[in-house]
Amino acid sequence: MKRIILIGYMGSGKTTVGRALGKETGLPFYDLDWYIENRMRRKVSQIFAERGEEGFRQIERNMLHEVAEFEDVVISCGGGTPCFFDNMDYLNQQGQVVYLRCEPEVLRRHLLMGKGDRPLLKGKSPEELIDFISQQLEQREPYYTKARYTLDVSLMDNYEKIKITIDKLKELLEL
Ligand code: S3P
């Protein structure tokens, strides 16, 4: 049974890599945010607006416990998922967890291209963004680095690099 779980900061490419890895391995791919949105019939940003971050984290935890029971799947988590409750220990119990590590500057570049629907980044200027990312990443790294595997994806930008990342993951996870 294979259960591959991708974690990392917003903008690190968890969804892109997860989808590609799913295709490559033939395993169904689940993105936790999409799963939450489907089950709740609400966008993540709506859940934040209606229930606050605390409400969102509770729902996220509950949904994580559904998705991470599925067998033979690739799962990508939200950037904050490993950092609340005992989620990180639970993830490590449930599968092969990979931390996709990425430099703050690269994260900023990715996030500036598509930060529209990320409640935590709402209203931040490009200048504020780099400080916010650096600080939050520092707080979150102690959780992320509990993952069994770490892969640096700072260089992952275009198609060729995604392909290289997938090849590295296959080697790392013995797929
Ligand atoms: C969050 C990351 C988001 C989403 C929510 C909170 C975070 O997921 O779960 O907006 O706390 O880092 P992505 O990492 O997929 O953007």
Image: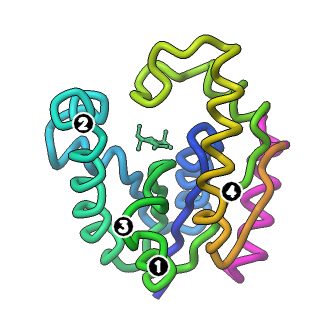
Q: CA distance from mark 1 to mark 2?
A: 24 Å
Q: CA distance from mark 1 to mark 4?
A: 17 Å
- Tag 2: residue type? Gly
Question: Looking at the picture, how far across and down is residue 106, in whole percent?
Answer: 77, 33
Point out the tag, 3 or 2, that comes first from the N-terminus: 2
Q: CA distance from mark 4 to mark 2?
A: 27 Å
Where in the image, quadrant-wise, is ligand 1 located? top left
Task: Write down the residue under mark 3.
Answer: 85
Task: Write down the residue under mark 2.
Answer: 52
Task: Write down the residue under mark 4.
Answer: 100
For disc 1, the neighbor class at 10 Å (few under 14, some 14 to 19, many from 20) is few
Q: CA distance from mark 3 to mark 2?
A: 16 Å
Say what secondary structure mark 1 lies in: helix
**In the displayed structure, does residue 109 sit left or right of residue 27?**
right
The image's mark for residue 89 is: 1
- Tag 4: residue type? Leu
Question: Looking at the picture, how far across and down is residue 122, in whole percent?
Answer: 45, 19
Which image quarter holds the C terminus? bottom right
**In the displayed structure, does residue 18 sit left or right of residue 152?**
left
- Tag 1: residue type? Asp
Where are the magenta residues, as a range?
A: 155-175
Query: Mark 3 and mark 4 in contact (Cβ < 8 Å)?
Result: no
- Tag 3: residue type? Phe
Question: Looking at the picture, how far across and down is residue 77, in whole percent?
Answer: 46, 56
